[in-house]
Amino acid sequence: MIDERLYQEYSNWLIDYDSLIKKVIDEKSPFSIRFKHVFDVVDYLYNKLIDEPEYTEEDHQIFVTGISYLSEQIYELDNVLVKFYDNDFEELEKNAKSVLLYLNIADFKNEMSILPEDERSDYSTLVNLYETVYKDYITKKAEVPNKIFENFNNVIEKIVNNLKLDYYSISDIFLEIADELGIV
């Protein structure tokens, strides 16, 4: 039996973040590519729960993964928007490249944090990078230099290779799910 309270919490969360969500999924927003397909899949599954009796445990797990990702990422984005951009989304969009890097690092760091301790050899490097990007660039609304992007890519590549992982971002996974559902 699926606990439907989560779906009510999601509905309330949508109301709370309505303005920001509309802006980030707007096709003109540089943030759209990161969030749109996740929202599309989560909304599809939310409506499926309401409309169709064939809602499965797999559907529920995808929904839970999607809202966990969205709530963490939208919270981070909202925090940056309020603290450093005085709620000026257009100003935030001007620094989207840096903010998206920050969100990517936060996302990968969260993924790494669930690994067993012995598999987190480069986790401290990732945490340091996260803190550096936040302190030196996000808080100052500064553009992150290319060397930091390269550093992040190198850290990910090293971690993925050391752990022999096939890593796909949540947004990539949800794009594939959206395609399978026929909602792309």
Image (cartoon, grey):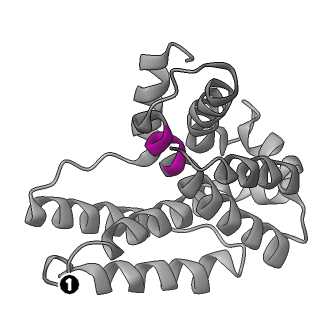
**Quadrant placement of the C terminus:** top right
Instruction: Say whether residue 10 is magenta.
Output: no
> With 56 as the anchor, is 12 left or right in this view?
right
Q: Which residue is denoted by mark 1 in the rendering?
A: 117
Q: Which one is in front, 172 or 96?
A: 172
Q: Is residue 90 visible?
A: no
Q: Which one is in front, 133 or 60?
A: 60
Q: Tell which residue pokes out farthest to the top in this image.
A: 182
Q: Which image quarter: residue 48?
A: top right
Instruction: Give coordinates of residue 118: x percent, y percent.
Output: 13, 83
> With 51 as the anchor, is 90 left or right in this view?
right
Q: Is residue 22 visible?
A: yes
What secondary structure predominates along the stretch shown in magenta? Answer: helix
Q: Secondary structure at mark 1?
A: helix
Above or below, comparing residue 16 to residue 25 in the picture = below
Instruction: Say whether residue 61 is magenta.
Output: yes
Above or below, comparing residue 162 to residue 3 in the picture = below
Instruction: Give coordinates of residue 180: x percent, y percent.
Output: 42, 18
**Residue shown at 46%/35% (left/top)?**
174
Above or below, comparing residue 125 to residue 38 in the picture = below
Q: Residues within 10 Å of mark 1 (few under 14, many from 20)?
A: few
> With 142 as the anchor, is 121 left or right in this view?
left
Instruction: Give coordinates of residue 12: x percent, y percent.
Output: 82, 53
Which amino acid, by three-letter code, is at mark 1? Glu
**Residue shown at 21%/79% (left/top)?**
120
Which stretch appears magenta? 60-64
**Residue shown at 86%/57% (left/top)?**
16
How many marks are shown on the rendered structure? 1
Q: Which image quarter: residue 168?
A: top left
> With 104 as the anchor, is 169 left or right in this view?
left
